[in-house]
Image: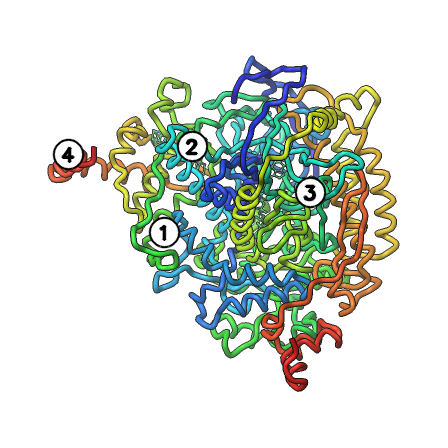
């Protein structure tokens, strides 16, 4: 790091200029940056943590792509259908289509960057089973697939930098990583009061370096948000400190919209014991590889929880379920591999009915189903994790598991083809974008989503920059305001503001208890009241000391993002009066076709309030609609909507 | 749930200096050192600087020295210490301190850039790569690396030897070369890079790096020693030597 102003008190703001700025260095951000650089754009990558440590590193199970290596019957159409079913047909179908069509190419491309996936006997990429996927589809490396993907992308970036070095003598002439740098504001033109909406464009962003607290601004006409999820608003989560919903909140404040925020994925299997690791993920591969769920009576309870819509695809007896692992074509799948929302709710019900494990979860048993050697080979990091953190040997004993807040389906509303939000120049990819997964994401569909839409956003951003006549300028007043907002927690200290850690715990408790896995109207109304109070307290949290690597200050600034995102979640959850995917209402337990075609869209009202409107989804294109049988669609669609199907329209001659 | 009080000592300070500060702190069943550091942050030391991400030994962010031993804080259980044992946490010694437990690990990113990248085989399109599991496994072992830099911190070639840093990439990046050498489809010959530019010759196979690796990668036995053997083979092979000379002449 430079020694510029280590103890500086007057606010100099370091300044950089780029064509494309990518905020986030996980799978989505890195793939976007690679693409922008390949398009000849000078690109900056910004991340809160060190390069190579983003959340993607934690992904375990695999990356879904219909390569057909394990079962030749697989195709993009089958993957598309699985994705739409998993999301209960609320997905943005165009995103799901692009994802299913392009995932395989994106995975193969990683091999040309040096990735080493596990292999099949004939030397192709091996693919494993996962919940909701018809065929074994997840490319993987043991249970550390995310590490392989992030390292591969990181190393590709280094190789591009080496190319640039050979050409220009400077590694960073086209691609530079700014690590441990947190972005706190986006700048747009036409943002002042009364400025016409149509003049609004991205102009840059502002943030601070975590190590010495110095401020920095990036002037750039295109910004890609790839900031990941929001799990830190919840008490029990598989997510790290980085998941404070920054991208979601930055986009809102810049005038963009969020969709589907009521849909949060509670992963069915998080660790429940010891308390300090509660929430840490136990990969779904344990079940994909044969692990089963049992209650305190030793019963495989998932057979009791197969919902009607999935009756035909899932086994009804243990024998059939067990045969499926070796003969998937002639047997139905084990119900342990139902989509995550179903499994999470089932576990919740078993625990509530008093059939839980000693520490309030259920048992996940692989020990009695696979040999110790196989377990250690297929699930090395799970073996390690339980051994070191819980003192449990998973080759001998069952694990105790329970639901944990894992993934946010909701996110920034974007154009499916190029990833641009409603604000020109502002793009989003990966977990912080919305639509692709509908009401529930299938396991393995995130890593592939990152690659497909990361690339599309990088390309979209480059094309957008090419089409600009002039670069939007950052307004000096906006920079001053950003500095003031960032410094606020220090000035609040003199006015006796609260400790941000205390306010954060309160926020987590509120969301966990009142807008958690099972929701009720009165509880959510209560949550909204509490959030209004937390909003006031968030504005005045105070921190002491200095700006050098000060976690209290960092949290104080993250807190306003968590609050805004939590408001969106709670508002949308109150509004949607049905249960679907990652949104379960105790008071409206059924899925309702009249809600399927409605999106709930949030936009910001000032610093800490949101507005919510309903919007109709664009109906699915006819050729995609026809990929499904009418009988299946009937479970999700209203009668009116079904008229578009081939079975319905064929009798009436050819419609449009 | 059982809990007890434990005596913690944490190094507090910055590049200009610092000291060990004593903290009595509550410890609950099942907790790891990182939990205790977080408890301090939430109570009496709001501005205590520490890096972490996954809290599950997967990201390699939380490296520190605990009672003098380089370890991941998130994977060090408090139950491994006696109740009356003082637990001392200090930053990695080989890298410059930024603040408290956070060091400037930039050295590693510089070295990463000096390792020539994967060179894909010409003429093979994406989707056409075929490799056997047994052949990828050797490199896969090295790709388990979470870049915690504990091995880099431990290796005596650079620990307390600032002067060796420019010439020595450290075990993690020497292993990266081995990983690419053993990649079934990489087409580059990396043996002169690793000896001349990255300083493999400095390594005298003490295995201290292997001992601290939280991923239990056999860095010395499986990466460094085989690389040394390959380098020796090459240097003493007169045909290779001649080939090199000719290649260099036409190439330059
Ligand atoms: C334990 C676990 C296991 C998982 N396993 C799988 C799996 O097997 N398969 C699968 O498909 N999915 C899996 N997922 C989900 C998947 O890993 C994530 O959804 C995905 O990695 C998100 O990637 P991303 O690129 O969107 O963001 P991330 O990888 O989270 O990266 C976000 C980046 O944004 C940066 N950032 C955030 N805010 C700011 C800011 N304000 N300023 C600057 N930078 C910022 C962060 O520093 C980080 O670099 C798993 C998730 C978890 C938690
Ligand atoms: S084996 Fe070599 S690289 Fe490893 S610690 Fe010893 S000298 Fe350093
Ligand atoms: S080789 Fe092991 S010790 Fe070294 S950086 Fe990688 S994981 Fe850490
Ligand atoms: S926090 Fe990720 S390894 Fe410790």
Tell me which residue sits at (76%, 42%) in the image: A564
Q: Earlier in the sequence, mark 4 or mark 2?
A: 2
Q: Single out the mark in the foreground, 1 or 3.
A: 3
Given the image, what chain letter belongs to the residue carrying mark 4?
B
Quadrant where the image shows the C terminus of chain A: bottom right
Q: Quadrant of residue B177?
A: top left
**Comparing labels 3 and 2, the label whose residue is closer to the camera:** 3
- Identify the residue under disc 4: B245
- Parent chain of label 1: B
Q: State yes or no: Cβ of the residue under disc 4 lies below 8 Å from any atom of ligand 2.
A: no
In percent of width and height, residue B137 lies at 36, 51
Question: What is the CA distance from the residue labelled 4 to the residue labelled 3?
Answer: 58 Å
Q: CA distance from mark 1 to mark 2?
A: 21 Å
**Label 1, on which residue?**
B137
Q: Nearer the viewer, residue B99 or A103?
A: A103
Question: By what rule are the colours in the image chosen?
Answer: rainbow
Placement of A27 over or under A62, stated as above or below: above
Indicate the position of residue A352 as horizontal and vertical percent values: 77, 60
Task: Evaluate if marks 1 and 2 touch, with contact meaning CB atoms under 8 Å apart.
Answer: no
Q: Residues within 10 Å of mark 1 (few under 14, many from 20)?
A: some
User: How much space separates mark 3 and mark 2, taking CA atoms?
Assistant: 40 Å
The vertical placement of A53 against A269, above or below, is above
Density class for disc 4 (Cα within 10 Å; few <14, some 14-19, many ≥20) is few
Q: CA distance from mark 1 to mark 3?
A: 43 Å
Q: Chain of mark 2?
A: B
Q: Are marks 4 and 3 in contact (CB under 8 Å)?
A: no
Which residue is tagged 3?
A251
């Amino acid at each position: 790091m430079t020694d510029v102003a280590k103890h500086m008190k007057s606010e100099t703001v370091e300044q950089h200029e780029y064509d494309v700025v990518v905020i986030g260095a996980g799978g989505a951000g890195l793939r976007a940056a690679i693409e922008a650089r390949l398009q000849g754009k000078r690109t900056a990558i910004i991340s809160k943590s060190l390069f190579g440590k983003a959340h993607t590193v934690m992904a375990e199970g695999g990356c879904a792509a219909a390569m057909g290596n394990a079962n030749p019957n697989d195709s993009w159409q089958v993957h598309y259908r699985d994705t739409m079913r998993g999301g209960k047909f609320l997905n943005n179908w165009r995103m799901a289509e692009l994802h299913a069509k392009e995932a395989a190419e994106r995975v193969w491309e990683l091999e040309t960057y040096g990735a080493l996936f596990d292999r099949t006997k004939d030397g192709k990429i091996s693919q494993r089973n996962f919940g909701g996927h018809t065929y074994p589809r997840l490319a993987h490396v043991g249970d550390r697939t995310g590490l392989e993907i992030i390292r591969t992308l990181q190393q590709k970036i280094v190789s591009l930098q080496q190319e640039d070095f050979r050409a220009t003598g400077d590694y960073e002439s086209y691609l530079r990583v700014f690590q441990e740098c947190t972005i706190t504001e986006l700048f747009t033109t036409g943002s002042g009061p009364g400025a016409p909406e149509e003049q609004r464009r991205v102009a840059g962003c502002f943030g601070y370096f975590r190590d010495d607290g110095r401020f920095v601004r990036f002037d750039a006409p295109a910004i890609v948000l790839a900031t990941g999820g929001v799990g830190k608003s919840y008490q029990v989560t598989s997510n790290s400190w980085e998941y404070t919903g920054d991208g979601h909140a930055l986009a809102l404040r810049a005038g963009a919209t969020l969709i589907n925020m009521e849909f949060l994925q509670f992963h069915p299997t998080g660790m429940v014991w010891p308390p300090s690791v509660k929430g840490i993920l136990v990969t779904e591969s344990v079940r994909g590889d044969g692990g089963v769920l049992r209650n305190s009576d030793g019963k495989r309870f998932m057979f009791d929880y197969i919902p009607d819509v999935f009756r035909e695809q899932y086994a009804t007896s243990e024998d059939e379920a067990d045969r499926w692992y070796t003969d998937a074509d002639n047997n139905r799948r084990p119900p342990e591999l139902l989509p995550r929302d179903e499994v999470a709710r089932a576990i919740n019900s078993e625990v509530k009915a008093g059939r839980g494990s000693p520490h309030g979860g259920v048992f996940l048993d692989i020990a009695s189903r696979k040999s110790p050697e196989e377990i250690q080979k297929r699930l090395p990091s799970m073996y390690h994790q339980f051994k070191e953190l819980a003192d449990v040997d998973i080759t001998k004993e069952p694990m105790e598991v329970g639901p944990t807040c894992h993934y946010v389906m909701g996110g920034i509303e974007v154009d499916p083809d190029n990833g641009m939000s409603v604000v020109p120049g502002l793009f989003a990819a990966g977990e912080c974008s919305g639509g692709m997964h509908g009401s529930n994401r299938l396991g393995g569909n995130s890593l592939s989503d990152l690659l497909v839409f990361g690339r599309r956003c990088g390309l979209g951003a480059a094309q957008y920059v090419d089409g600009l006549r002039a670069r939007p300028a950052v307004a000096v007043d906006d920079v001053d305001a950003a500095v003031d907002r960032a410094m606020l927690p220090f000035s609040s200290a003199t006015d006796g503001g609260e400790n941000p850690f205390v306010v954060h715990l309160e926020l987590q408790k509120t969301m966990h208890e009142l807008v958690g896995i099972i929701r009720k109207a009165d509880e959510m109304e209560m949550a909204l009241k509490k959030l209004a109070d937390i909003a006031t307290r968030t504005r005045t949290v105070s921190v002491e000391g200095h700006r050098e690597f000060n976690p209290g200050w960092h949290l104080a600034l993250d807190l306003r993002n968590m609050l805004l995102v939590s408001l969106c979640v709670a508002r949308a959850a109150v509004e949607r009066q049905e249960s679907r995917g990652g949104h379960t209402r105790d008071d409206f337990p059924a899925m309702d076709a009249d809600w399927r075609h409605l999106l709930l869209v949030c936009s910001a009202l000032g610093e800490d309030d949101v507005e919510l409107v309903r919007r109709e989804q664009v109906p699915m294109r006819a050729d995609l609609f026809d990929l499904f049988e009418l009988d299946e669609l009937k479970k999700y669609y209203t009668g009116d909507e079904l008229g578009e199907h081939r079975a319905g329209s064929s009798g009436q001659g050819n419609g449009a | 749930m059982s809990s007890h009080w434990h005596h913690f000592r944490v190094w507090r300070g910055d590049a200009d200096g610092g000291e060990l500060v004593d903290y009595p702190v509550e410890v609950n069943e099942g907790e790891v050192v990182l939990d205790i550091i977080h408890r301090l942050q939430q109570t009496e030391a709001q501005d205590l600087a520490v890096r972490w991400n996954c809290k599950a030994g997967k990201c390699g962010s939380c490296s520190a020295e605990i009672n003098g031993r380089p370890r991941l804080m998130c994977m060090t259980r408090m139950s491994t210490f006696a109740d009356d044992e003082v637990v001392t946490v200090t930053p990695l010694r080989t890298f410059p301190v930024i603040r408290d437990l956070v060091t400037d690990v930039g050295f590693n990113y510089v070295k990463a850039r000096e390792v020539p990248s994967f060179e894909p085989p010409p003429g093979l399109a994406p989707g056409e790569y075929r490799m056997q599991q047994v052949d990828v496994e050797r490199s896969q072992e090295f790709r388990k690396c979470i870049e915690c830099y504990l091995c880099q911190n431990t290796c005596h070639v650079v620990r307390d030897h600032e002067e060796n840093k420019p010439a020595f990439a450290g075990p993690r990046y020497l292993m990266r070369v081995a990983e690419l050498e053993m990649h079934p489809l990489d087409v580059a010959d990396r043996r002169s890079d690793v000896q001349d530019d990255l300083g493999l010759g400095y390594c005298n196979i003490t295995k201290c790096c292997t001992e601290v690796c939280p991923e239990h990668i056999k860095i010395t036995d499986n990466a460094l020693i085989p690389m040394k053997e390959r380098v020796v083979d090459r240097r003493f092979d007169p045909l290779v030597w001649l080939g090199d000379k000719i290649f260099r002449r036409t190439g330059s």
